[in-house]
Image (cartoon, rainbow, N blue to C red):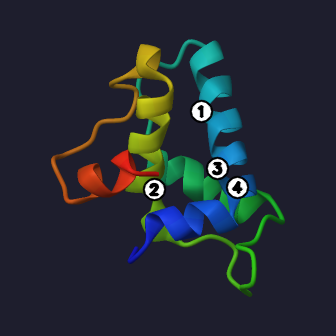
Amino acid sequence: MKNFNQYHRKNPHIWNEFQRLTLALIARGVKHYSARTIIHYIRMNTQLKENNSSFKINDHISPYYARKFMQEHPEHDGFFKVRRSRVDELVKTA
């Protein structure tokens, strides 16, 4: 993903659905989950599409959303397992 911040600003509906599903999992008592699985679920089970695109959702976005979720919801830090990556610095500015 070349520019996560730009993607995120253009597609807030995808972030909203990612948060909604993640929080629903947490409410059910799930301790850890895959951000990639959530993105694939959104791609396969909704009609959400990227703005200005014929694509539903870029599947390379999951590491960015995993980090963003844990930054915005620090009480759930560790819900997604992440490895050190250049993504870490890119998400901090989102």
Dot 2 or dot 1: first in sequence order is: 1
Disc ID at residue 68: none
Q: Is residue 50 above or below residue 67?
A: below
Residue in the picture at 54% in, 72% down: 58
Residues at discs 2 and 1 in contact (Cβ within 8 Å): no
Residue in the picture at 29% in, 36% down: 81
Residue farthest toward the front in the current orientation of the protein:
93
Dot 4 or dot 1: first in sequence order is: 4
What is the spatial separation of the Cα atoms under label 1 and label 3, in whole angstroms? 10 Å
Spot occupied by residue 62 in the image (x, y as percentages of width and height): 45, 56
Residue in the picture at 72% in, 46% down: 17
Give, as a three-letter code, the residue at label 1: Thr
Give, as a three-letter code, the residue at label 4: Pro
**SS at circle 3:** helix
**SS at circle 4:** helix
Residues at discs 4 and 3 in contact (Cβ within 8 Å): yes
Give, as a three-letter code, the residue at label 3: Trp
> Is 66 situated left or right of 54 in this image?
left
Spot occupied by residue 13 in the image (x, y as percentages of width and height): 75, 55
Quadrant the N terminus occupies: bottom left
Mark 1 Cα-neighbour bin, 10 Å: few <14, some 14–19, many ≥20: many
> Is 89 situated left or right of 13 in this image?
left
**SS at circle 1:** helix
The residue to which callout 4 is attached is: 12
Residue farthest toward the left in the current orientation of the protein:
84
Q: Residue 45 falls in which quadrant of the image?
A: bottom right
> Is 28 situated left or right of 85 in this image?
right
What is the spatial separation of the Cα atoms under label 2 and label 1, in whole angstroms? 12 Å
Spot occupied by residue 8 in the image (x, y as percentages of width and height): 58, 60
The residue to which callout 1 is attached is: 22
> Is 43 situated left or right of 70 in this image?
right
Disc ID at residue 15: 3
